[in-house]
Image: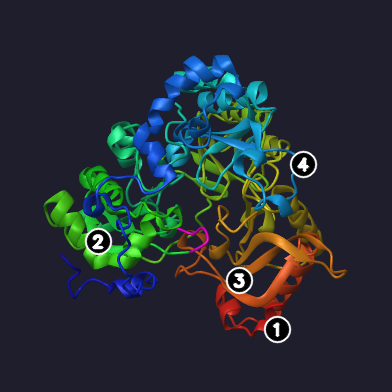
Amino acid sequence: MTPDASTTPLEQTAPQAPRRAARAPRPGGDGQWRIDGTKPLNHNEEVKAADGGLNVRERIERVYAPGGFSSIAPDDLNGRFRWWGLYTQRRPGIDGGRTAQLSAQELSDEFFMLRVRIDGGSLTTEQLRVVGALSTEFARDTADITDRQNVQLHWVRIEDVPEIWRRLEAVGLQTTEACGDTPRVVLGSPVAGIARDELIDPTPVITEIVDRFIGDPELANLPRKFKTAVTGHPSQDVVHEINDISLVGVVHPELGAGYDLWVGGGLSTSAHLAQRLGAFVAPDEAAEVWRAVVEIFRDYGYRRLRNRARLKYLVADWGPERFRRVLEEEYLHRALPDGPPPPAPAGRGDHVGVHEQKDGRSYVGLSPTVGRVSGTLLGELADAAEAAGSHRVRLTPHQKVVVLDVEPDRVEAFTARVEELGLTASPSPFRRTTIACTGIEFCKLAIVETKDTATRAIEELERRLAGVEIDTPITLHVNGCPNSCARVQTADIGLKGQLVRDEHGEQVAGFQVHLGGGLASADRAEPGVGRTVRGLKVTATGLPDYVERVVRRYLDTREPRETFAAWAHRSDEEALR
């Protein structure tokens, strides 16, 4: 089915990815299982065909943990380990200029990043305390809150991984399919089930997806990673426009509350915003529809070239109408009802500050600095939350922390206590809106440092703009390479790490600048990708100077109620330099 005349046209509700011109057939095809067969067309596919990524856990426990790093087979180390949330981290001392010159083996240290999968960002204080203890005992007190609602630990030894799993799983956490060509963590509204203005609680859908399908071998060999987001909050707080599948809460005039279905979003080096299919998904059918979309990706996704293997390329080639037709006719074997698009987002999707829950208690959104925390801090946060009457914490897609169920008479004491830990419910504008990826400190793909660079920029901007009223959010995203883990194309000011020339002609760490991007959950009524200005690059040390200059210029020359994104897209290039 296609949307009827009463449905808002698809092209008016989401920017359309450009339709690709027909390509000449490749010998052997694009590796689409349904069309070309399952013969592997590259080494990654050969590795997965030889042995599924889920199977490596037994070898980790029985062979690699007892035998140490040197005992690990290369295809497990560089491939299948990802199915259990493990990547080797960057060897210290390798500068960004050598990132593209060295092999993965040369770049890799004998320690791991371990990603703890936290679906919906939902943690109990007991779970939070366990993650904190694992960090202090096994990960040199490292912990980063990611923009995928996960926690990443570093400096993990292979010898310690089985014990880490045992402790995580004892409290209901896991690292299963936290990485790899799999359905990764399910983003969920951080205020699911407790917000006064929620349209629908997505918790049952997220729980069903995770319980039924995560770790299912039938869905564990996809062309590339598969990202999911589900929300029922009117702020649209899960960056749904850049996920492979998103279910966004809506109220159907006849069928009641349910979800609007979006597919094919993703950033990296080629940004595509997700497409509405115009289909309404009832809550009790959401997990089944989710599985069907994953199966389409498994069966029709492009496997020949990994740089074209994300679902966004299939959706761009097919278009939303064909994708919906295949979904309904080949996989669901029934039509989905047409549905309304989500209304314009209401409120800020980061949930920072003190807010009343529907039960009269409060939830408190806290801002660390660019997601950088520690195991010690996580344990202290669990203690502070429990002292305030809370046993539930949520992580957000904006590298924030939300503590639920705080008793109203304990809010003031709680916010004062966590302020001492480096978490604030009333951050400065740039502390609130800045996110940063892992960067060169640990990531083998990175070219520049990000966390400390972003932190120094925030501190400088807080000082320089202390007396300036910034009455609208201006998001600042800092990424260490072109792959956009920090979503640079969808920030007001997005910074893509690269080496640049300084005023003396020396090659130094810096960034290409993207301006005017945004998503619904960042107070942007219409999502969009930022523009680049020819030759506009900044050094890492010159970053505060540039941001201050462009923000002041925006505030001085904007039209009434004009957003930074709108101003950036209409301004001439000289104004943006």
Please name the residue shown 46% across and 31% down the image. Answer: 84
Find disc 4 in the rendering and name its residue: 93
Decide which of tag 2 and tag 3 comes sooner along the chain: 2
**Is residue 385 inside the magenta stretch?**
no
Label 3 vs 4, first from the N-terminus: 4
Q: Earlier in the sequence, mark 3 or mark 1?
A: 3
- Looking at the rendered structure, the kind of residue marked 4 is Gly
Please state which amino acid type lies under the numbered disc 1.
Glu
Please report whichever mark, 1 or 4, sits nearer to the chain's N-terminal start.
4
Q: Visible in this render: residue 392?
A: yes
Q: Which mark is residue 515?
A: 3
- Compare marks 4 and 2 and give the one earlier in the sequence: 4
Residue stretch in magenta: 266-270
Asked if residue 452 is positioned above or below residue 55 in the image, the reply reads: below
Mark 4 or 2: the one toward you: 4
Quarter of image, res 130? top right
Tell me which residue sits at (53%, 20%) in the image: 64
Is 477 placed left or right of 329 in the picture?
Answer: right
In this rendering, the label closer to the viewer, 2 or 1: 2
Colour scheme in the image?
A: rainbow
Q: Horizontally, is 226 left or right of 5 in the view?
A: right
Distance from disc 3 to disc 1, alpha carbons, whole Å, reads 13 Å
Q: In the rendered image, which residue does mark 2 sit on?
A: 323
- Mark nearer the viewer, 1 or 4: 4
Give how far apart the Cα atoms at labels 3 and 4 are.
32 Å
Q: Which mark is residue 574?
A: 1
Looking at the picture, tell me which residue is in the foreground, 453 or 413: 453
Seen at 84% across and 64% down, the residue is 506
Amino acid type of the residue tagged 2 in the rendering: Phe
Left or right: 326 with respect to 488?
Answer: left
Where residue 118 sits: x, y (%)? 47, 36
Task: Give coordinates of residue 40: x percent, y percent.
Answer: 34, 45
